[in-house]
Image: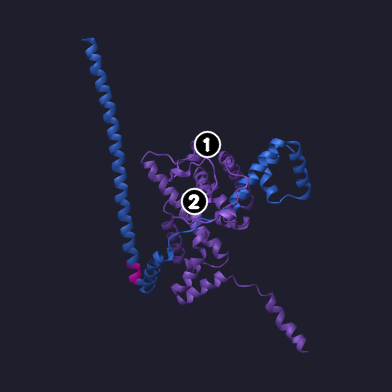
Amino acid sequence: MLNDRHTIWAAPLTALPRLDPDIALVRQFRATASPAVFEILFRKYQSPVFNLVHRMVNGEDAYDLTQEVFYRALRSLSTFQGDCKFRTWLYTIARNVCLNYLREKKVRAGLEGVSLDTEDDQPGFIPEPADPSADVSQIVEVRELQRVVDRVLAAMSPEQRLLITLRDLEGLSYEEIAQITEMTLVNVKSKLHRARQSFKVKFQPYLENIDPNFDLEVRAGGTEK
Amino acid sequence: MTREEAQALFSDYLEDALNTHERDEMQAFLAREPECAAEMFALDRTLTLLHRLPPREPALDIWREFLPRVETFQAEQKLGWIKRLRLRGAEFQAQFSSGIILWTHALSECAHARLSRYLQHDHGLHSKAEGGGEETC
């Protein structure tokens, strides 16, 4: 009898979906408006958001834009329905912030008579990096590889950069990427494939300079300054 | 399987998203076409490097810089709706004004650049005419 009662009460409990801890934190923040609660979310996602923003804008203003992403999230937290993961929602904001920034930058450069259409106007053109030491003949350190990857990404269109960053650098699923980019799954897959091919072509000269025994895990480290 | 068809399936092959038949077909094709196999090997190596690349980490404590904005936001939330509306209005006014200033600045820069181009062109024509005049004299 006792066992039966246990099974009756245990079944619905185990069948309950586990509440996403981020959504629980969002609800807690809405209820208490405590900065400490928002700080937990901030600290959890500051690195992935910074990484995405940094790759998207090639390092420029990455700190300011990361703050802007979280500020927009803070302001619209009351509209977050919880029908997708908090991470997906935050990445959507980050994508919009970065694309707006790049669009404004292009308009500003257009006013100054400079074209930013590197992908469309001049195929194969790779803009000079902010750091001249990015021209490496032999890649033996992670920092050098980071610079080269940033340089190659900077030569691609923002959409391709976004897809490669989300899938190959942040490791998001296709479904999450489709939600963030507002594309269909098939579209994401085909565009990502094209982006990878384009990246590979631009990365090829550097690939030959990378030591085959190059081990990222041993050499990993170094923060962005 | 053609070369183009195989290239279109590279990503799926590397992510193990092909069915058994497609995978076998791809493997047979790659064994026949060493050039294509080399191309796929390069893509595989590139993606492996990307997947294992450590993320860019912020060196600064962004939260410390961000905290005042959270406090401002909270203070704003505590205001009554009329005051909040006024605040939003003032913010909009400030942003609109700075936008107008930037726009007029950009417009004047453009006009200045166009003007200097015309002047250079005009000067070029003038000096040419002068040169031509000397020749005839």
Q: Is residue B2 left or right of residue A38?
A: right
Pinpoint the chain carrying mark 1.
Answer: A
Q: CA distance from mark 2 to mark 1?
A: 19 Å
Discs 2 and 1 carry the same chain letter: yes
Q: Which mark is residue A176?
A: none
Q: In purple, which chain?
A: A
Pinpoint the chain carrying mark 2.
Answer: A
Judge whether residue A34 is colored magenta: no
Q: Which residue is mark 2?
A: A56
Q: Which residue is mark 1?
A: A124
Q: Overall secondary structure of the magenta stretch? A: helix
Query: Which range of residues does the magenta coloring cover?
Result: B82-86
Q: Is residue A58 left or right of residue A10?
A: left
Relative to A1, does residue A178 appear above or below in the rendering?
above
How many neighbours does mark 1 have within 10 angstroms: few (below 14), some (14-19), or many (20 or more)?
A: some
Q: Residue B112's x, y, as percent?
A: 28, 38
Whether residue A183 can be seen here: no
Question: Chain B drawn in what color?
Answer: blue
Three-letter amino acid code at disc 1?
Answer: Gly
